[in-house]
């Protein structure tokens, strides 16, 4: 141990922002533990570390006695007074008892402490960095795949994409560049865990914000999203400027904007719906691409009966009920879809339209 260590602590404080005092306190605690581990705990000892020179000394506490019976815990009065002239019998004094080979142990211990503190500081910086980025889209490279969990390199750490966060049917390969959404950052004893997703509805929201300037600028609002990742999504949008078509802005020239998002999601179908304050019009829009004849909504029950042409019933419901399910999720209304003939029969109505 020497001035080199002290200089190193100064450099670490300057470059990494780890206070030298904190490092020295950690080194002192580790040195006391190292001494007890290597030389036993029978004696009451104190390991001192000089923050000026880096010198390490071990002091043993001993009782001042006229005649020494146990030299490990006792010191003769005459010998004690050479160190402490005013000491009296029965006093407790500290006497240097640095083992010959403790310097090597101390140097190794100090090195381990510094390395550990640097790791902790690095983990803390990474955690704080990604905590601020929670809710963002990141781009990384797939580093490894273990037990169906995909690990994506994100600079100094990895993003974790669990099986539930992966789009069904997508194939992931080592070295593949991929985008994902950071939805949770956890701090653990082994460092931060960055959880990312490609199925989260907010991933779709962020993709639209990146692709559609009107959304990024706040001219067009995303009111709601309903998503079944890898299959189909519905997104309701609203323009704050009458001169801007909310749906057209999201679709883009020749459909380019939405097509870029569809390509990123591996062909997932996206229905862009115009939001409406009127629940009946909103529900009708949400069932796109099906044509709706009428909507009868109960505001109190949050339930709506939707009437569609007979030939549009299967389209309105969708494969395995997907279109109706997404529309209900998008609008937060329970939706009961009926064909025109069924509705007229149930309500004993005569005529062409309900």
Image (spheres, rainbow, N blue to C red):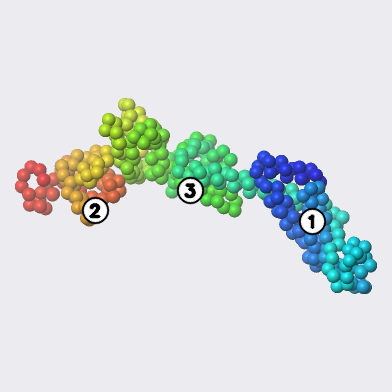
- Regarding mark 1 in the picture, which secondary structure is present there? strand
Residue 104, image x, y percentages: 82, 51
Residue 300 in view, yes or no: yes
CB atoms of marks 1 and 3 within 8 Å: no
Residue under the point 58% across and 49% down: 191
**Lower sequence index among marks 1 and 2:** 1
Residue lying at the far top of the rendered structure: 254
Between 248 and 322, the residue placed more toward the observer is 248
Q: Residues within 10 Å of mark 3 (few under 14, many from 20)?
A: some
Q: Residue drawn 51% across and 37% down? A: 140
Count all numbered tags in the image, as a single digit.
3
Residue underneath mark 2 = 302
Identify the image quadrant of the C terminus.
top left
Residue under label 3, please give it.
184
From mark 3 to mark 2, how far is it between C-alphas? 32 Å
- x then y, percent, for residue 26: 70, 53
The one nearer the camera, 104 or 125, is 125
Asked if residue 343 lies left or right of residue 50, the reply is left
Residue at the limit of the structure toward the right, as seen here: 78
């Amino acid at each position: 141990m020497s001035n080199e260590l002290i200089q190193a602590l100064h450099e670490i404080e300057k470059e990494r922002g780890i206070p030298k005092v904190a490092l020295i306190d950690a080194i002192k605690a580790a040195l006391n533990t190292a001494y007890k581990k290597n030389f036993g705990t029978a004696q009451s000892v104190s390991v001192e570390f000089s923050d000026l020179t880096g010198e390490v000394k071990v002091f043993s506490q001993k009782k001042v006695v006229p005649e020494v019976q146990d030299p490990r815990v006792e010191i003769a009065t005459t010998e004690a007074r050479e160190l402490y002239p005013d000491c009296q019998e029965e006093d407790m004094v500290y006497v240097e008892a640095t083992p010959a080979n403790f310097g090597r142990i101390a140097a190794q211990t100090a090195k381990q402490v510094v390395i550990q503190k640097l790791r902790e500081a690095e983990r803390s910086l990474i955690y704080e960095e990604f905590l601020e980025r929670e809710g963002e889209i990141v781009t990384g490279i797939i580093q490894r795949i273990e037990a169906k969990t995909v690990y994506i390199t994100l600079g100094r750490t990895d993003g974790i994409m669990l099986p539930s966060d992966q789009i069904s049917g997508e194939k992931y390969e080592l070295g593949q560049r991929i985008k994902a959404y950071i939805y949770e950052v956890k701090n653990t004893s082994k460092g931060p865990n960055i959880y990312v997703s490609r199925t989260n509805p907010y991933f779709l929201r962020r993709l639209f914000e990146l692709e559609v300037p009107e959304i990024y600028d706040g001219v067009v609002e995303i009111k709601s999203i309903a998503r079944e990742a890898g299959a189909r999504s519905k997104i309701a949008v609203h323009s704050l400027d009458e001169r801007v078509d909310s749906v057209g802005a999201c679709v883009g020239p020749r459909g380019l904007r939405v097509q870029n998002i569809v390509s990123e999601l591996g062909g997932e179908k996206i229905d862009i719906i115009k939001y409406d304050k009127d629940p009946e019009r909103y529900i009708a829009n949400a069932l796109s691409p099906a044509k709706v004849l009428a909507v009868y909504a109960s505001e109190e029950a949050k339930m709506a009966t939707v009437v569609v042409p007979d030939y549009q019933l299967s389209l309105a419901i969708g494969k395995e009920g997907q279109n109706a399910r997404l529309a209900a999720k998008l609008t937060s209304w329970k939706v009961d879809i009926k064909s025109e003939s069924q509705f007229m029969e149930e309500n004993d109505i005569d005529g062409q339209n309900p």
